[in-house]
Image: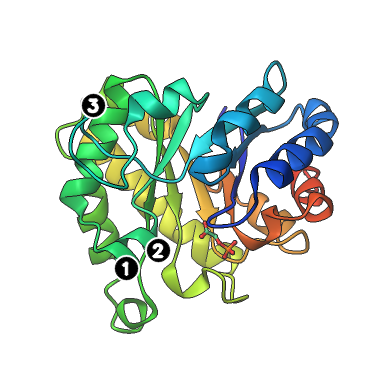
């Protein structure tokens, strides 16, 4: 059984005080949400305070990015050791906004994934096609390239410690969600790749989250798909009410 994961990606939103306030309010809700794991990804500046607020609760912290080096002359970057030190247990890697805004490549994603694993953090590896790629019938080709490139050189044991997020770029922040069937088809394709590259039990065990305009009113349909093991949520994770509704998504 794959335990569902509901993860909030706060992107470049929330001050330290806002992050702490949110965590305090969500803790009792998360405590009741025995059916899923609860993750939030604040901006770097709020991580340590958010982790202190979340301590001892069911809410765990993710960073939104990392550098692969342990330390060094990388102005503006953050190492995985620093993220651990701030209280993170997960790190989002290869989000499409970083691929598009910052030119992040599959090779860089791969280095980040390996560094995160080596340091004991769970990478949440994002993949997804653009609208043009989908319309050109290239969805599977793109997913395969991002999957094999981003996860190159991992052992099956490494693979069993990651999460994947399928986030079609055209659905992120647009209000245009993939239908549950479309998402499930892509997830099935990714799971088949996992089976081919890493093995049967690894493919059965990996959690594949869907991301892209997940809201309280569409999460139920998405989560009803057997292939969908959770959600990575941007906009709707920013308000306590809507994040609460996401955690309490209708099950079965
Ligand atoms: P969205 O963002 O829920 O606002 O579409 C999802 C994401 O970027 O992870």
Q: Is residue 151 left or right of residue 38?
A: left
Label 2 with label 1: CB-CB less than 8 Å: yes
Please report the residue visible at 79 percent of the width from the left and 55 percent of the height from the top.
Answer: 242
Q: Quadrant of the C terminus?
A: top right
What residue does disc 1 label? 100
Residue 70's label in the rendered image is 3
Give the x, y percent position of residue 175: 63, 75
Please report the residue visible at 32 percent of the width from the left and 68 percent of the height from the top.
Answer: 100
User: Could you tell me how far apart the alpha carbons at marks 2 and 1 are, in whole angstroms?
Assistant: 5 Å
**Helix, strand or loop for disc 1:** helix
Pick whichever of labels 3 and 1 is earlier in the sequence: 3
Residue 97's label in the rendered image is 2
Give the x, y percent position of residue 17: 72, 42
**Helix, strand or loop for disc 2:** helix
Give the x, y percent position of residue 99: 30, 61
Q: Does residue 119 lie above or below 96 as drawn? A: above
Please tell me in which quarter of the rendered image ligand 1 is found.
bottom right
Give the x, y percent position of residue 205: 45, 29
Tell whether circle 2 marks a residue whose Cβ is less than 8 angstroms from ligand 1. yes
């Amino acid at each position: 059984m794959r335990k569902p994961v509901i993860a909030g990606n706060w992107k470049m939103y929330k001050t330290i005080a806002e992050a702490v306030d949110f965590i305090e309010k969500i803790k009792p809700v998360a405590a009741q949400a025995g059916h899923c794991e609860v993750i939030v990804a604040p901006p770097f500046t709020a991580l340590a305070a958010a982790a202190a607020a979340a301590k001892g609760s069911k809410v765990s912290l993710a960073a939104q990015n990392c550098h692969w080096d342990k330390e060094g002359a990388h102005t503006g970057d953050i190492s995985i050791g620093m993220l651990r030190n701030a209280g993170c247990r997960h790190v989002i890697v290869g989000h499409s906004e970083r691929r598009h805004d910052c030119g992040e490549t599959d090779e860089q994603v791969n280095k980040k994934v390996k560094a995160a694993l080596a340091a004991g953090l769970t990478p949440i590896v994002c993949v997804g096609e653009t609208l043009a790629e989908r319309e050109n019938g290239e969805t599977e080709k793109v997913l395969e390239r991002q999957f094999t490139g981003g996860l190159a050189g991992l052992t099956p044991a490494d693979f069993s410690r990651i999460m994947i997020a399928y986030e079609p770029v055209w659905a992120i922040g647009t209000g245009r969600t993939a239908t549950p069937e479309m998402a499930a088809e892509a997830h099935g394709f990714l799971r088949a790749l996992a089976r081919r590259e890493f093995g049967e039990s690894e493919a059965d065990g990996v959690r594949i989250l869907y991301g892209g305009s997940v809201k309280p009113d569409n999460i139920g349909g998405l989560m009803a798909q057997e292939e969908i093991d959770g959600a990575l949520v941007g906009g709707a994770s920013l308000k306590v009410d809507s994040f609460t509704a996401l955690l309490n998504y209708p099950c079965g």
